[in-house]
Amino acid sequence: MTDALGPLRDVPMEVSVEIGRTSMRLADVYGIAVGQVIELDRAVGAPVDILANDKVLIARGEVVEVDDEYGVRVTEVVGGSGGAEPG
């Protein structure tokens, strides 16, 4: 079987994790202060989205701690050829 991706396998991609989103008025954005808490649209413990190039949803997972840094344990790989929009 021929590898359809071939040389594309070595193309670097940025992978990011989104823990949630919110909408704010411009005045509120300019008023952000140190120590302020910004509420997001996801509950604690809810799966986080794993995105390729900030656009394509490739997987979901849970936040974990690895040697005093954050990591993500993949719990679901999103199927399909083009992925899905984050939500």
Image (tube, grey):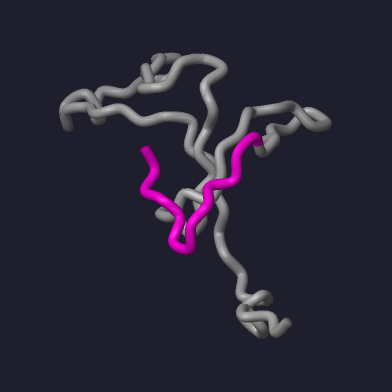
Task: Mark yes or no: residue 21 visible.
Answer: yes
Q: Nearer the viewer, residue 32 or 67?
A: 67
50 w.r.t. 4: above or below: above
Name the residue: 46% across, 15% down.
43
Q: Is residue 54 visible?
A: no
Q: Position of residue 27 (x, y in %)?
A: 16, 27
In the figure, residue 83 lies in which quadrant?
bottom left
- Give the residues drawn in magenta, as a range: 75-87
Q: Is residue 44 above or below residue 32?
A: above
Residue 59 located left or right of residue 7: left
Q: Give the quadrant of residue 3.
A: bottom right
Q: Position of residue 10 (x, y in %)?
A: 68, 76
The N terminus is located in which quarter? bottom right
Judged from this view, the residue extending furthest toward the right is 67
Indicate yes or no whether the magenta region holds residue 20. no
Q: Quadrant of the C terminus?
A: top left
Give how far across and how far down residue 29 sits, in percent.
Answer: 25, 29
Q: Main secondary structure of the magenta part?
A: loop
Residue situated furthest front in the rendering: 1
Seen in the picture, residue 13 relative to 77 is either above or below; the reply is below
Q: Any magenta on residue 78?
A: yes
Foreground residue among 64 and 35:
64
